[in-house]
Structures are given as C-alpha cells and as structure tokens.
Amino acid sequence: EKLGSVPISRRTPEERKGDVDDVMNWMRNGKSEFEDPTGDFTRIDQMLPKKKGQKPKDRAREIESALDWMRNNDVSPVEVEPTDAGFQAVPSVPVSKRTPEERMNDVDDIMNWMRNPQDESMDPTGEFTRVDQ
C-alpha cells in the first residue's frame, strides 16, 4: 500500500523562524508598510479568518504558514481589485413547502409506481412518467 507524500517546505526551519519573527515585528510595529515592503503579510492577514482569543505568536505562525505554502506552490498573494459591477443578485432557491410526511408519501408512491409502471392508477397525474423519460 502506497502512502501519500508529506509536503516539505523548500525553506529551512531557520528561514521560516525568521519569517515568523518578521511577521511578529510587523504586528508589533502597527503593521507598518516599512516592515512589510512587499505587502504580502498584509494581504495574507486580510485573507485569513481571525480566531477569537488568538495569540499574536499563533497569528504570526499562521501567516507564515500561509506564506510558506504559497511560496511552495508558486502562488502569489495578489490584491484583488474591486469591480464596478459589485455583487449580482442571485435568484432565490425554491424551498419545498411540503411536510416531511408528505415527502415520505411521495417517495412511497414513486416506489409503488416503479414496481408497477403499467398500472396507471399509480400515476394519476402522469408526473412520474414525464420525469422518468
């Protein structure tokens, strides 16, 4: 049995620790542009959800891990430009107004019709036949 591979960082543990330290310094200094010349820390920080009660060191590790993953997978944390179109309204999703009991009865009726498709009394409206085509 073949096991899947474990992703390995291209950067050394020392380089990754340096990145965590850089993120920590950036956070300590008010997330200044000087500490983040490429803007990668800022973009990743904005992308990752903030966890309630998360310690700064844990947040720094999370940002560094995301940055490391992006580097290993040749992904760039590009900034998304806003569009003039905005959000488009999505039509509402139809919701069944039938009770669970009514839906269960429908399943029973369909099963009975499937067992006896020639019996027209099992499909008085013709709906099962139309859907089955």
Image (tube, rainbow, N blue to C red):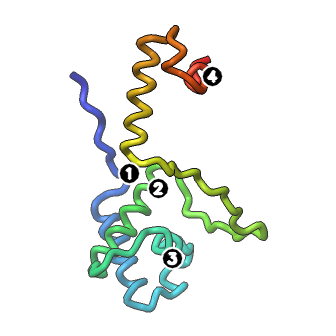
SS of the residue under disc 2: helix
Q: Is 26 left, or right, of 131 in this rendering?
A: left
Residue beneath label 4, please?
Answer: 130
Write the residue at 41% across / 48% down.
99
Q: Mark 1 and mark 2 in contact (Cβ < 8 Å)?
A: yes
Nearer-the-camera pick, 110 or 12: 110
Q: Earlier in the sequence, mark 2 or mark 4?
A: 2
Q: Is 2 left, or right, of 129 in this rendering?
A: left
Residue beneath label 1, please?
Answer: 10
SS of the residue under disc 1: loop
Q: Disc 2 to disc 4, how far (Cα)?
A: 54 Å
Nearer-the-camera pick, 86 or 41: 86
Q: Disc 1 to disc 4, how far (Cα)?
A: 59 Å
Kind of residue sitting beneath label 2: Arg
Quarter of the N terminus within the rendering: top left
Of circles 4 and 3, the one toward us is 4
Q: Disc 3 to disc 2, how far (Cα)?
A: 16 Å
Residue beneath label 3, please?
Answer: 42
> Callout 2 environment at 10 Å: few (<14), some (14 to 19), or many (20+)?
some
> Callout 4 environment at 10 Å: few (<14), some (14 to 19), or many (20+)?
few
Of circles 3 and 2, the one toward us is 3
> Callout 3 environment at 10 Å: few (<14), some (14 to 19), or many (20+)?
many
